[in-house]
Image (spheres, rainbow, N blue to C red):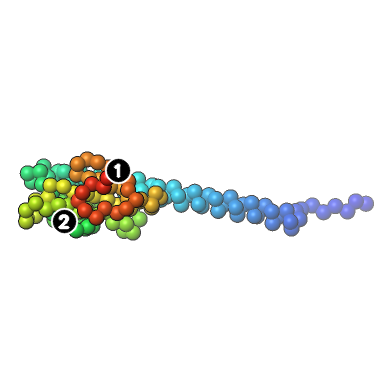
Amino acid sequence: MHNSKLGFTLIELLVVISIIGILAGLTLVSFTAAQKQARDTQRQSDLKQYQNLLEAFASSNRGLYPVRTTSTEASTLCNNNPLPAPACPQDPSGGTWAYRYISDQTVVGPATATQYVLWVYQEAKSQYFVICSQGDTGTTATEPTTYTCPSGL
């Protein structure tokens, strides 16, 4: 009589469970990176939407932009102050990063700026995506602090 048992040994089961765990971990890491990239792409699109709103505002105000001489959340321009409310996007992560805006000021008044810089931090690249009133766009490692377009865009 032959005594044979069917089934897996404990070692075989542990090896298979370990391999499944490693594959699950790798999948989770790549999925998280893809989510960050998707949010960064949305942020770039949102910032371009703010740019379009600012250009539309300027076309109705003698080519001038709203004045914010210090770094301000771009959403403060919304709710008809001076941009229309429905068109102002919010950060896709639920508000972790803010869209920022700064302008120059030539004369005291609500719409007297001639230049601006818009920017947002990007998670996946750990850089700032920047749009300038002159039409330059790109990324920079440091956060803009003035209305002057960062060099190298």
150 horizontally vs 17: left or right: left
Residue at position x 69%, y 53% in the image: 15
Q: Earlier in the sequence, mark 1 or mark 2?
A: 2
Q: Percent x, y for residue 88?
A: 22, 51
Residue shown at 22%/40% (left/top)? 135
Give me the disc on residue 38.
none
Viewer can see residue 85: no
Residue to which mark 1 is pinned: 152
Q: For the residue labelled by badge 2, is the local secondary structure a helix, a strand or a loop?
A: loop
In depth, the one of 2 and 105 nearer the eye is 105
**Residue drawn at point x = 29 percent, y = 54 percent:** 143
- Residue 98 in percent (x, y) is at 28, 56
Percent position (x, y) of residue 107?
6, 53
Q: Which residue is disc 2 drawn over? A: 68
The residue under label 1 is which amino acid type?
Gly
Residue furthest to the front in view is: 151
Q: Residues within 10 Å of mark 1 (few under 14, many from 20)?
A: few
Q: How many marks?
A: 2
What is the three-letter code of the residue carrying label 2?
Answer: Arg
C-alpha distance separating marks 1 and 2: 24 Å
Neighbour class for label 2 at 10 Å: few (<14), some, many (≥20)? Answer: many
| Residue 138 is at least partly visible in this image | yes
Q: Position of residue 115 (x, y in %)?
A: 16, 47
User: What residue lies at 19% left-to-right and 58% top-to-bottom?
Assistant: 70
